[in-house]
Amino acid sequence: MPVMPLTQTPVATETAVPGTVRYALTDMAATILSRQDIESLLVTGTVTIVGTLEETLGYDLGIATQPYADGEMLPRTAELAVEVNAAESPLDDPVIRSAIEAVLSTDGDPTTIREDLANAGYPDGITLYVTAQPPELMAFMTALVNRTAAYSILIQPAPSDEHHLLLRLNPEAVDVLIPLETISLYYRASPDLSVTISPNGLPVAVR
């Protein structure tokens, strides 16, 4: 059975044979999982990628990055981090870059940061453009907005390939990388299913 591309939403699985499990993943959950993870689910059923948690409720087993009212948290998580592009103005200024790093690390005092920005020539604050890899991570841009709101720093989606900040999942070490939050996975299964948690932290169901 072929593996569906993770960016395809939704994917029809109406040809599932009786007895197989119909899995549904939100697009954000699918972004977190690897191709091998998807293949492990396909061993016992079919996989459909949908847009929202509510859309998973019509399937035998749903996996999402938000909790279900009658579901459980999985042991599988992903780390969301932001990479600071030190080559892009104004972050090429060490003073500005240090201030932004302090803000994103939640170590900065708002008054001090605003003063630092003003002294560096930005009395009205600065605008930083953010992008994400993969693009679905832009759904978490609010994590950046919430951290910077009190510091006269405006966060906006990057209008082109040039960006100041890059959202990444489980990133390898880079020069300037700041953790933002841990993303948890949750699942909900139909009562007639027998569910076990696999070594990779995912629910595997059989009837």
Image (cartoon, rainbow, N blue to C red):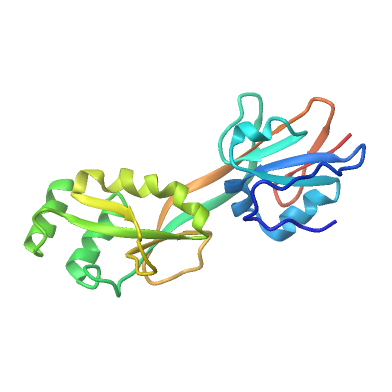
> Can you say which quadrant of the picture contains the C terminus?
top right
- x and y percent of residue 130 in the render? 36, 59
Please name whichever residue, 206 or 30, is drawn nearer the observer in this view of the structure: 30
Vertical position of residue 94 compared to residue 78: above or below: below
Q: Residue furthest right?
A: 18
What residue is drawn where x is 74% and y is 36%? Answer: 61
What residue is drawn where x is 27% and y is 48%? Answer: 148
> Can you say which quadrant of the picture contains the N terminus?
bottom right
Q: Residue furthest bottom?
A: 87
- x and y percent of residue 164 in the render? 32, 65
- Is residue 137 toward the left or the right of residue 42 in the image? left
- Is residue 78 toward the left or the right of residue 48 in the image? left
Vertical position of residue 105 compared to residue 21: above or below: below
- x and y percent of residue 149 in the render? 25, 44
What residue is drawn where x is 72% and y is 45%? Answer: 48
Please name whichever residue, 33 or 128, is drawn nearer the observer in this view of the structure: 128
Please name whichever residue, 177 or 42, is drawn nearer the observer in this view of the structure: 42
- x and y percent of residue 180 in the render? 41, 51
What residue is drawn where x is 17% and y is 67%? Answer: 95
What is the number of callouts on the image? 0
Vertical position of residue 71 compared to residue 94: above or below: above
Residue 72, by quadrant, is top right
